Amino acid sequence: MAKPRITTQRQLRAEFWQEHPTAHRGKLRDGDYTTDTRCAFVDWLDMLAKNGDISEDLAQRATL
Protein backbone atom coordinates (compact mmCIF):
# COMPACT_ATOMS: atom_id res chain seq x y z
CA MET A 1 0.00 0.00 0.00
CA ALA A 2 1.29 3.44 -0.93
CA LYS A 3 2.11 6.01 1.72
CA PRO A 4 -0.54 8.74 2.08
CA ARG A 5 0.55 12.05 0.51
CA ILE A 6 -1.00 14.17 3.29
CA THR A 7 0.10 13.22 6.78
CA THR A 8 -0.69 16.20 9.06
CA GLN A 9 -3.75 18.28 9.85
CA ARG A 10 -1.80 21.42 8.92
CA GLN A 11 -1.16 20.08 5.40
CA LEU A 12 -4.76 18.94 5.18
CA ARG A 13 -6.24 22.35 6.08
CA ALA A 14 -3.86 24.21 3.75
CA GLU A 15 -4.85 22.00 0.84
CA PHE A 16 -8.55 22.30 1.65
CA TRP A 17 -8.44 26.11 1.54
CA GLN A 18 -6.34 26.01 -1.65
CA GLU A 19 -8.78 23.65 -3.38
CA HIS A 20 -11.86 25.48 -2.08
CA PRO A 21 -11.09 29.18 -2.60
CA THR A 22 -14.77 30.16 -2.53
CA ALA A 23 -15.47 28.42 0.81
CA HIS A 24 -16.33 30.81 3.61
CA ARG A 25 -13.15 31.28 5.64
CA GLY A 26 -14.60 33.59 8.24
CA LYS A 27 -15.99 32.03 11.35
CA LEU A 28 -19.45 32.66 12.67
CA ARG A 29 -19.98 34.37 16.01
CA ASP A 30 -19.79 31.11 17.97
CA GLY A 31 -16.47 30.14 16.37
CA ASP A 32 -17.85 27.62 13.90
CA TYR A 33 -17.60 27.68 10.13
CA THR A 34 -20.73 27.80 8.00
CA THR A 35 -22.64 24.56 7.41
CA ASP A 36 -21.73 24.58 3.71
CA THR A 37 -18.03 24.87 4.55
CA ARG A 38 -18.16 22.10 7.16
CA CYS A 39 -20.06 19.78 4.80
CA ALA A 40 -17.58 20.47 1.99
CA PHE A 41 -14.69 19.66 4.35
CA VAL A 42 -16.23 16.37 5.51
CA ASP A 43 -17.07 15.26 1.96
CA TRP A 44 -13.56 16.18 0.82
CA LEU A 45 -12.01 14.24 3.75
CA ASP A 46 -14.08 11.19 2.87
CA MET A 47 -12.91 11.34 -0.74
CA LEU A 48 -9.25 11.67 0.29
CA ALA A 49 -9.51 8.71 2.67
CA LYS A 50 -11.18 6.52 0.05
CA ASN A 51 -8.50 7.45 -2.51
CA GLY A 52 -5.70 6.67 -0.03
CA ASP A 53 -4.43 10.27 0.00
CA ILE A 54 -4.80 10.37 3.81
CA SER A 55 -4.91 7.66 6.44
CA GLU A 56 -8.21 6.61 7.97
CA ASP A 57 -6.82 7.74 11.33
CA LEU A 58 -6.20 11.28 10.01
CA ALA A 59 -9.66 11.36 8.46
CA GLN A 60 -11.21 10.47 11.83
CA ARG A 61 -9.34 13.08 13.88
CA ALA A 62 -9.07 15.97 11.40
CA THR A 63 -10.82 19.22 12.20
CA LEU A 64 -11.15 22.40 10.21
Image (tube, rainbow, N blue to C red):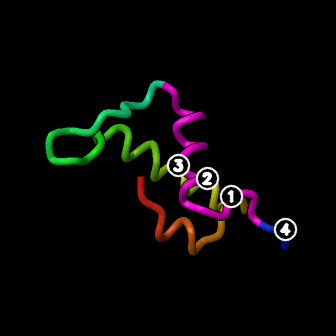
Name the spot of residue 20 as percent of width and height, x first.
53, 32
Identify which residue is drawn at 80% across, 68% down. Answer: 3
Q: Nearer the viewer, residue 29 or 45?
A: 29
- Element on which disc 3 rests: helix
Cα–Cα gap, marks 3 and 4: 22 Å
Instruction: In the displayed orientation, state which residue is furthest to the top.
Output: 22
Depth check, mark 3 against mark 4: the one in front is 3
Identify which residue is drawn at 64% across, 55% down. Answer: 48
Look at the image and give the residue range highlighted in magenta.
Answer: 4-21
Q: Which residue is mark 2?
A: 11
Name the spot of residue 27 as percent of width and height, x first.
27, 39
Instruction: In the displayed orientation, state which residue is furthest to the right.
Output: 1
Three-letter code for the amino acid on which mark 2 is drawn: Gln
Three-letter code for the amino acid on which mark 1 is drawn: Ile
- Element on which disc 1 rests: loop
Chain-order first, disc 1 or disc 3:
1
Q: Which residue is mark 1?
A: 6
Chain-order first, disc 2 or disc 1:
1
Cα–Cα gap, marks 3 and 2: 6 Å
Q: Which residue is mark 4?
A: 2
Mark 4 is surrounded, within 10 Å at the Cα level, by few (under 14), some (14 to 19) or many (20 or more) other residues, namely few
CB contact under 8 Å: marks 4 and 2: no
- Element on which disc 2 rests: helix
CB contact under 8 Å: marks 1 and 3: no
